[in-house]
Amino acid sequence: MNGCRSAAGELITAHRKPKENVTMLLYEDLARARMREVREAVGDQRLARRLQATRRWRWLAGWAARRAARAAALL
C-alpha cells in the first residue's frame, strides 16, 4: 500500500488508482481547509459584532445613568 501525508498530517493511501485517489483527497483537503478558514472568519465577525454591541449597550447605560442623575438633581 502506498501512502503519503496530507497538508493536515493525515495519511493518504492509494489503492487501485493512486493518481485519482490522491487528487480527489487533495481537493477534499483543500475544501476542508477553506471551510475551516470560513468558520474562523465567521467566528471573528461574530466576536466583533458582540464586542460592538457590548460597547453600544455600555454607552447607552452610561447615558441613561447620566440623564437619570440630572433628572434627580432637578427634583
Image: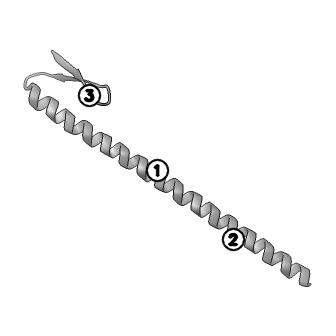
Picture residue at 20% right of the left edge, 33% below the top: 25
Is there a contact, CB below 8 Å, between mark 3 and mark 1? no
Q: Residues within 10 Å of mark 3 (few under 14, many from 20)?
A: some
Q: Which mark is residue 60?
A: 2
Secondary element type, mark 2: helix
Q: Earlier in the sequence, mark 3 or mark 1?
A: 3
The vertical placement of 65 against 43, above or below, is: below
The Cα atoms of the two marked residues, 2 and 1, are separated by 26 Å
| Quadrant housing the N terminus | top left
Left of 57 or right of it: where is 70? right
Q: Dot 1 surroundings within 10 Å: few (below 14), some, or many (20 or more)?
A: few
Residue 6 sits in quarter? top left
Q: CA distance from mark 2 to mark 3?
A: 51 Å
Of the two numbered discs 2 and 3 on the same chain, state the one appearing first in sequence.
Answer: 3
On the rendered structure, is 21 left or right of 51?
A: left
Q: Which mark is residue 6?
A: 3
* Amino acid at circle 1: Gly
Q: Residue at x 72, y 68 (%)?
A: 61
| Residue sticking out furthest to the top | 1
Q: Residue at x 85, y 75 (%)?
A: 69
Residue receiving disc 1: 43
Earlier along the polypeptide chain: callout 2 or callout 1? Answer: 1
